[in-house]
Amino acid sequence: MHMIESGNVAAATGVKLARANVIAAYPITPQTPLTEKLSEFVAAGELAAEYIPVESEHSAMAVCIAASSAGARAFTATSANGLLYMNEQLHWAAGARLPIVMCVANRGIGAPWTVWNDHQDTISQRDGGWIQIYANDHQQIIDSVIKAFYLAQTVSIPVMVCYDGYILSHTYMPFEKPDQDQVDAFLPPFTPENMLDPDRPYNFNTVTLPDVRPDIHGQTAPGYMEIRHCLHQDMRGSIQVLEEIDKKFQAAFGRGGHPFVEPYKCEDADHVVVCMGSLSYHFRDVIDLLSQEGLKIGVMGVQLYRPFPEKAIVEALYQKKSIMVFEKALSYGNQGALYADIKSALYPCENRPEMKNFILGLGGREIKTSILVETVRNAVKHTAASDDHPMWVGLKCQE
Amino acid sequence: MKPYKFSNFLSKSESGPGDGGRTGSWRVLRPVIDTTVCIPSKTGKPACFNCWLYCPDAVITKTIPPVIDYEYCKGCGICAQECPANAIEMQDESQFAPKEK
């Protein structure tokens, strides 16, 4: 069915189609309309889920952890400081291998207080053991949410579906809503091997000693480090699983084909702009304008950020002259996180491309197409020795 | 090729000996029961058993004489504190450790 709705409603519709069993959330701008929509679905009897209003994001994630441990398909959503308030529980959810799905409507982090879009909230959570998928438009939001439930339960790792606050969360765009029958046929039921079950009692995630130990059957039970190594291995393994799920999704719904990165005019390009989220679609206008000037340039949106799909990234970028990474977040005192990751992925390549890092749009600072055109045009012209310090685009006064 | 299995390693345990780890290695002081003073041991009657009752790790048996499982006893000393006959002495664990060569 064709819909024209906001990105938050696209996300809520995806959650409904995936038949989430438990939803626990605390309102925060710009995510609020998503969970409001879900509570409407539940109140109207359209979604047979338990909607649990909680007093904080920390509790929202705690409820999801409990629900998921009991074998329920659990969902929550948040933004910015709400996500940070969950932090401790986020690491727990990943370590406990619970396939929770969460939408994050990306928003800048206070202080100073901001409600507008950038990526600092989810980038700050990149090392917690969650899979992170960045959607570029409304269609990708609804599709990613459905795929996220499939991926999470297959690999037993929680998944964050991230999309730009306001730019996507509050704007209206047309998208296809898949039929319930099709989603039911696509998404297998959630039948966890390990769950809280009074008939088969187990302790989960109690104090785990540094070393391995014999369990009560005399088998070697893993220590903390083995369990964490397993999480890392499974994160790596989930790259291939996402590719397979994307293929199945494409066969069922006719959309997809770019589970890791989405290139635009990159094939013959000398220069490639890399970024995440809606900015990568915004950049297509910039690329079109610069192509008309005779520049061989493309843009690549990174959709899977954790686990990092370095194989796909290296394949797309290793033969280019220069790479420009535009980011709405950074690791303060160093560089943009995406820039550092791409640089490290390209390190083993011969004739590494020249790389530049740009920081922009923090706290919702407007990103004008004309400024992007000028920035990229200048960056391509001045291909002096790479400067590892990120350049800030759109600063209007400096201290 | 065997299909890759996800989440092979979880922190998962059942209630039973050993599944919380051999916590006896945490012990600094070892409770030692003097059976000439211990009430059930001395009288041969199933009486007292405060040590069994109060042990937070349930590592003391309700037998005559009571037996402490040193694989799991953490050496907290509650049994020694609760024994009405002062039959339990907390002794330095190092004297029981095998001597290094």
Image: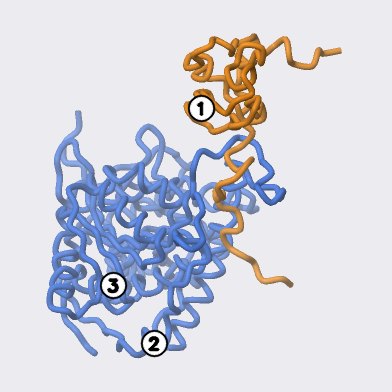
Chain colours: A blue, B orange
In the depicted structure, whether residue A330 falls above or below residue A398: below
Q: Percent from the top left, x then y, of residue A154?
A: 50, 69
Number of numbered discs visible in the structure rendering: 3
In the depicted structure, whether residue A231 falls above or below residue A182: above
Q: How crowded is the residue under tag 2: few (<14 C-alpha within 10 Å), some, or many (20+)?
A: some
Residue A162: which quarter of the image? bottom left
For this rendering, which residue is in front, B74 or A219? Answer: B74
Tell which subunit mark 2 falls on: A
Answer with left or right where residue A139 lies relative to residue B67.
Answer: left
Q: Percent from the top left, x then y, of residue A277?
A: 32, 62
Residue A3: which quarter of the image? bottom left
Q: Quadrant of the N terminus of chain A?
A: bottom left
Q: Are marks 2 and 3 on the same chain?
A: yes
Residue located at (15% from left, 60% from top) = A32
Q: Earlier in the sequence, mark 2 or mark 3?
A: 3
Amino acid of disc 2 = Phe
Residue located at (58% from left, 63% from top) = B6
Q: Nearer the viewer, mark 1 or mark 3?
A: 1
Q: CA distance from mark 2 to mark 3?
A: 17 Å
Amino acid of disc 3 = Val
Q: How crowded is the residue under tag 1: few (<14 C-alpha within 10 Å), some, or many (20+)?
A: some
Q: CA distance from mark 1 to mark 3?
A: 50 Å
Residue located at (20% from left, 68% from top) = A8
Residue at which label 2 appears: A253
Residue A96, visible in the rendered structure: yes
Residue at which label 1 appears: B55
In the depicted structure, whether residue A222 falls above or below residue B48: below
Residue at which label 3 appears: A15
